[in-house]
């Protein structure tokens, strides 16, 4: 009987990530490993687990485990500053979108044919919706981002809260979970309503948090880059690049806060547009591939 932890010694010897095939892990992860609901996106991940500083991404066939410098339960602030800087989140989100799009083109032909019959229209439609959202965000970034904070963001928060309430009402048979969802949804919906009224206040708070986050991440990352130059899992230049990028964004937040807000909305528009583009391209490819495979006899 072997546990996932028995294969993680290399993480304490400077290795950034260990990949463990699921077949080698015979002991269940839980309850020692706790499922993590919020994570930076990574390609192929179907679930994420944490145990102290260990962070495991579960894929279909393996566990990809790395070790954070700080345990998010014991030191959430330093974890956010050092292990999950905003620059890193944006970078890994874009990388995940690109990798996922490439992987979609490598599926087995018969599987792609099945996907075509079930989801290409849905993907095409969802991609078009993402394009529309990206277009709106891009327009706001170029002209005036105020409506994003006065209408769009509060509406999204309110909508998420109402969805959670509805889910709780529908799950009345599961009394405990239903009540939690209703309470959680009510709090989120209330926050959404408050955002409509106090949007200027929360925008100032967002900028203040970003300033602290950017400068803290820059200081911690750059100090580590120079102190541990020869012992950085991701390399000196990559780590330094993250630190310098955080520093630049921090300076921008102080000197040109409106410019930073425009930039972040522009980046969000770019991420949404890219995700939509890959969905549309994948749907188009699924449709054409299915047509060719059916003509070649794959569908018979």
Image (cartoon, rainbow, N blue to C red):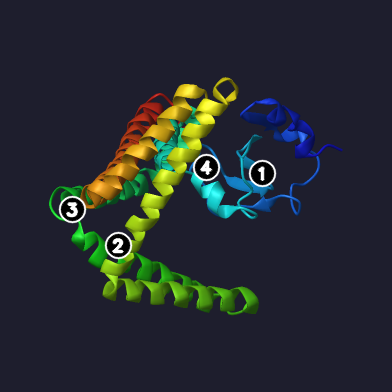
The disc at residue 203 is 2
What is the x, y in percent for residue 27? Answer: 81, 43
Q: Residue at x 66, y 30 (%)?
A: 18
Q: Disc 3 on helix, strand or loop?
A: helix
Q: CA distance from mark 4 to mark 2?
A: 24 Å
Q: Residue at x 20, y 62 (%)?
A: 147
Residue 264 in view (yes/no): no
Disc 1 + disc 2, Cβ < 8 Å: no
First of labels 1, 2 by sequence position: 1
The disc at residue 137 is none
The disc at residue 82 is 4
Provide the residue designation for mark 1: 53
Q: CA distance from mark 1 to mark 2?
A: 32 Å
Q: Nearer the viewer, residue 178 or 191?
A: 191
The disc at residue 140 is 3
Disc 1 + disc 3, Cβ < 8 Å: no
Q: Label 1: few (<14), some or many (≥20) within 10 Å?
A: some
Q: CA distance from mark 2 to mark 3?
A: 16 Å
First of labels 1, 4 by sequence position: 1
Q: Label 4: few (<14), some or many (≥20) within 10 Å?
A: many
Q: CA distance from mark 1 to mark 3?
A: 40 Å
Disc 4 + disc 2, Cβ < 8 Å: no
First of labels 1, 3 by sequence position: 1
Q: In this rendering, which labeled residue sits more in front, label 4 or label 3?
A: 4
What is the x, y in percent for residue 240? Answer: 44, 28
First of labels 2, 3 by sequence position: 3
The residue lying furthest to the right in this view is 1
First of labels 4, 2 by sequence position: 4
Q: Disc 4 on helix, strand or loop?
A: helix
């Amino acid at each position: 009987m072997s546990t996932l932890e028995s294969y993680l010694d290399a993480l304490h010897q400077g290795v950034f990530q260990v990949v463990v095939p699921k077949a080698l892990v015979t002991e269940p992860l839980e309850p020692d490993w706790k499922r993590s609901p919020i994570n930076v996106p990574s390609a192929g991940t179907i679930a994420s687990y944490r145990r102290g500083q260990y962070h495991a991404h579960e894929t279909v066939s393996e566990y990809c485990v790395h070790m954070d410098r700080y345990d998010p339960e014991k030191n959430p602030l330093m974890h956010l500053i050092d292990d999950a800087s905003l620059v890193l989140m944006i970078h890994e989100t874009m990388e995940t979108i690109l990798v996922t799009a490439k992987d979609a083109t490598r599926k087995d032909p018969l599987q792609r044919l099945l996907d075509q019959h079930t989801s290409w229209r849905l993907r095409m439609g969802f991609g078009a919706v993402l394009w529309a959202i990206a277009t709106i965000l891009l327009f706001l970034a170029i002209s005036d981002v105020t409506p994003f904070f006065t209408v769009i963001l509060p509406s999204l928060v309110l909508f998420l809260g109402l969805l959670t309430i509805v889910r709780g009402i529908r799950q009345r048979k599961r009394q405990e979970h239903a009540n939690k969802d209703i309470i959680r949804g009510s709090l989120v919906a209330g926050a959404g309503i408050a955002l409509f009224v106090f949007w200027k206040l929360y925008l100032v708070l967002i900028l203040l948090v970003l300033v602290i986050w950017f400068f803290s991440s820059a200081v911690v990352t750059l100090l580590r880059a120079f102190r541990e130059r020869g012992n950085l899992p991701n390399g000196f230049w990559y780590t330094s690049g993250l630190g310098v990028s955080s520093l630049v964004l921090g300076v921008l937040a102080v000197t040109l806060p409106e410019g930073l807000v425009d930039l972040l909305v522009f980046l969000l528009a770019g991420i949404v547009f890219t995700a939509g583009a890959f969905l549309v391209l994948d749907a188009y490819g699924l449709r054409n591939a299915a047509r060719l495979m059916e003509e070649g006899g794959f569908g018979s």
